[in-house]
Structures are given as structure tokens and as C-alpha cells.
Amino acid sequence: MSNTNETILEVDLNKLKHNYYYLKSLLKDDCKIIAVVKAFAYGHGDIVISKTLENLGVETFWVADFEEGIILREGGIKSKIIVANPGRKSFNEIIKNNLDVVLHNKNLLDFYISKSANVNVHIKFNTGMNRYGFNVDEIEEISEKIKNHKQLKVVSVCSHLSSADDLSKSKATLNQIKLFEKTANRLEENLSCTLDKHILNSNGFLHFPEKLFDMVRLGITLFGSYKNKNLLQVSKLKSVISQNRNIKKGAGVGYSSGFEAVKDMNISVVPIGYADGLNRGFGDGKGNVLVNGVLCPIIGNICMDSFMIDTSEVSCKEGDEVEIFGGRNSILKLSEDLGTIPYEIYSTLNRRIKRVYIDN
């Protein structure tokens, strides 16, 4: 535990392990976990999180770009690392660092065909997300290209669900899964090989467990930010009260006097702001933090390096802990207050917030 950094993200690796083992217990024995550790492992620290999961038995990691993959390699990760959006300029670094790539359009496929280096590839189809992925009707064309270029070792076929988090759209999700299965089977037939198949993400896995294939991509559930009583929230963002102040009725608080006191009150300053990733949408009735067991509303406009809270209903002193989110102040509730999702809050936490790890 750091005694010098006032604002820290405390990451409990024991809870990460608990979540991993719980999720693994729901899988078929032959289904493998792909740990999604993009965006600095959702803000939790990619190397530490990946090493912990690798030690637990995770054999495959998923990152957004080649730089994230290189960071893991240089950090000592030996397992397979899949780069979701490899691009062209990164080719030499991808080969040098033994990274796998997702191929998702014909231009990218043609580029990798033009190179002689051997590389593990994962073929992605668009089944309804309409983001990355080959069109399903391109399958015969790309199959012929792959068959004629043996330097491309196809490891898996994948797709991405668009609405697995919304059970009111279950029909669309099931249609995606059905189309994916048909397409994946056709690719296997065309290439005369058996491929790992994966389309389920965290939401897909927990909502449609009967639709598991060979692999499942898990990210947010590993960190416990999900409405499931068996998952534990891994991280706690906390700071301290750096100054207390008494203000009179009518006094303004913060830039543009974003809050005006309707009565005499006590307020406190917390040294974390939007430069640290705290969204400026908080305040004006949105968002609460925990001080000595009492929820205190965020007031005024979020500043670059600080924000203010109403501490009229709690006894507190300068130096007391402020829990922005954690075990007793759920990030799910905080994200709902803001009208966003935990992914955004996690992934925008600035690196200047020190990550402190607990591991018994």
C-alpha cells in the first residue's frame, strides 16, 4: 500500500482469481478462455493482470493493437496474443514479437498474402455488428486465397455479438450465432481443417451459455463489473479529502458556480479530476462517493485535478478516505448515474493514478 499517492486504484488480484475460477466453472471442459486485456486491461494494468491470469492457466490474450501486444511480450507474457486490429504498418513488429492477427477485410488479407513470413491468423466475419469482419458472402473468395498461401496459418474463426447485453434483442443475437456457426463450418470445410470458433463475449456467455463454442472472450466479467452476485468487483478507486470548507447559503461552488448552496453547508475537495479520467458529466445531482460510510453527492463542475462533494451529513476531516467506486460504492451504480457503462469509466482512468495491487 502506498503512503505517498493520495489517489489510487486498488486492484485486488484475489478477487480477479475468484472471478476467473467462477467463470471457468461455468465452461465446458474443452472450452478455453480468451482474456481480453485491451485498453490497459480495462484500466487495471495490463502486465500485472495478464501475468496473474497466465499463472492461472489462461493461454490466449486479446488486445486491440500491436503496441498493446508488444507491451505484454516485453512484460514477460509467453502465451498467445491476438491483435484485433493489426493494420499494415505494424507487420514487422507483429512478426518480431510473435503476435497473432485478426484478418477482417480483403485489403488486409491481400497485404498479409503479399508477405512471405509465417503468421497465425484468425478470420473474423461480420454477422450483424457491422463493424469489423469479412462479409459472409466473401467466404468462397477468401477461402481460395488462404488455401493458396500456406504462410497464413488459420487458427480460429470469430465474430462479435452486437446486442448480447440486451435480452429484448435475443432473437437478433441468436440469429447472429446461427449465421456464425453456419459460416464457421463452411470455412472449415473449404480449408479442410478444424478451427477454434468464438463469438461469445462476457454478455453472450452469461446470457447464452448453451451457445458456447471452442473459446469465449471474457473481459469485463473478469473484473466483476457485472450484475451477477457471484462476481466480485476487483478494483476500488479511492482518494482523500484534501480540504474541508464551510460555505453560506447562496455561495457558488466550482467553475461557473456550477452548484449554488441552498443552505449553509460543509463541502470537501477531493484531489482527482477530469485529467485523471473522472467524467465532467458528474455533479449536478449525478454521482455519489463514499466518506466514512456515508454517500456524499458530487457538487459543482468537475475540475481538471479535483472535485467537490457535499459532506454536510458526515463527520469527516482532511485526510479521510474517499471511495469513488469500490466494494461499497458500485461502479455499476456510478456508471448508471452518468448514463454510461463501466467499460468507459475503467478505460479512461489516467495512468497517473497509481495502481496498487493486493495479492495474498
Image: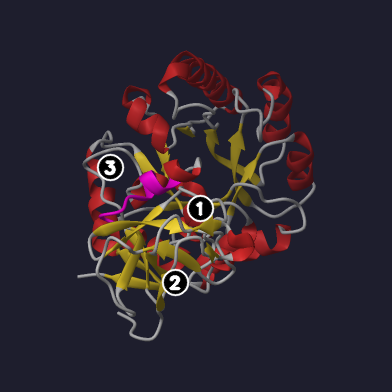
Question: Looking at the image, which residue sits at the far bottom?
Answer: 4
Tag in front: 2 or 1: 2
If the image is split into quadrants, where does the N terminus sit? bottom left
Answer with mark 2 or mark 1, whichever residue precedes in sequence.
2
Q: Picture coordinates of residue 322 (x, y %)?
A: 34, 67
Q: What secondary structure is marked by label 2?
A: strand
> Badge 3 local density, few (<14 within 10 Å), some, or many (20+)?
some
Which sits in the foreground, 346 or 321? 321
The answer to whether 88 is drawn above or below residue 306 in the figure is: above
| Residue underneath mark 1 | 282
Q: What secondary structure is marked by label 3?
A: helix
Number of residue marks: 3
| Residue underneath mark 2 | 269
> Badge 2 local density, few (<14 within 10 Å), some, or many (20+)?
some
| Residue underneath mark 3 | 23
Q: Dividing the picture into quarters, in which one does residue 45 lie? A: bottom left
- Identified by mark 3, the residue type is Leu
